[in-house]
Image (cartoon, rainbow, N blue to C red):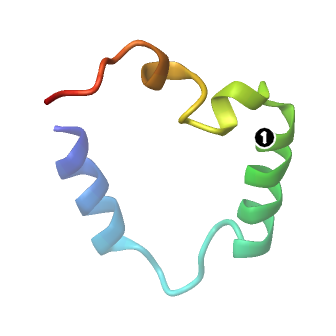
Amino acid sequence: MKAVNAARMALRRTSEPRVCLDKVIETMYETGKDMNAKYRETSRGGLAMKIVACD
């Protein structure tokens, strides 16, 4: 249901974005700086530490 709602919102979108791309990038950068380094580099944390390679 969430995907359907997201699609509907995208189709109804006006030509003017609510948040400018520069603000999105700035926010993502700041969020990344605040994260623990092992979660920024996914090969060093999260599921990468829990899953054994499949043969």
Q: Residue at x 79, y 73 (%)?
A: 22
49, 11: nearer the viewer: 49
Give the image location of residue 44, x and y in percent.
60, 28
Check the image and report above or below for 2 versus 39: below
14, 49: nearer the viewer: 49
Please, which residue is most extreme toward the front here? 55
Check the image and report above or below for 54 versus 10: above
Q: Residue at x 80, y 53 (%)?
A: 29
Which part of the image, by quadrant, shows the N terminus?
top left
Q: Amino acid at mark 1?
A: Thr
Give the image location of residue 15, x and y in percent.
50, 87
Instruction: Judge from the rendering whether residue 34 lies leftward or rightward of residue 17; answer left or right.
Output: right
Instruction: Judge from the rendering whether residue 18 lies leftward or rightward of residue 54; answer left or right.
Output: right
Report the number of discs.
1
Check the image and report above or below for 50 versus 33: above
Secondary structure beneath dot 1 equals: helix
Q: Residue at x 17, y 50 (%)?
A: 4
Instruction: Judge from the rendering whether residue 25 lies leftward or rightward of residue 42; answer left or right.
Output: right
Q: Mark 1 — residue?
A: 31
Q: Residue at x 55, y 36 (%)?
A: 42
46, 22: nearer the viewer: 46
Which part of the image, by quadrant, shows the C terminus?
top left
Check the image and report above or below for 17 versus 7: below
Give the image location of residue 24, x and y in percent.
71, 61
Instruction: Judge from the rendering whether residue 20 lies leftward or rightward of residue 46; answer left or right.
Output: right
* Quarter residue 35 falls in: top right
Please, which residue is most extreme toward the bottom here? 15
Mark 1, Cα crowd under 10 Å, few <14 / some 14-19 / many 20+, is few
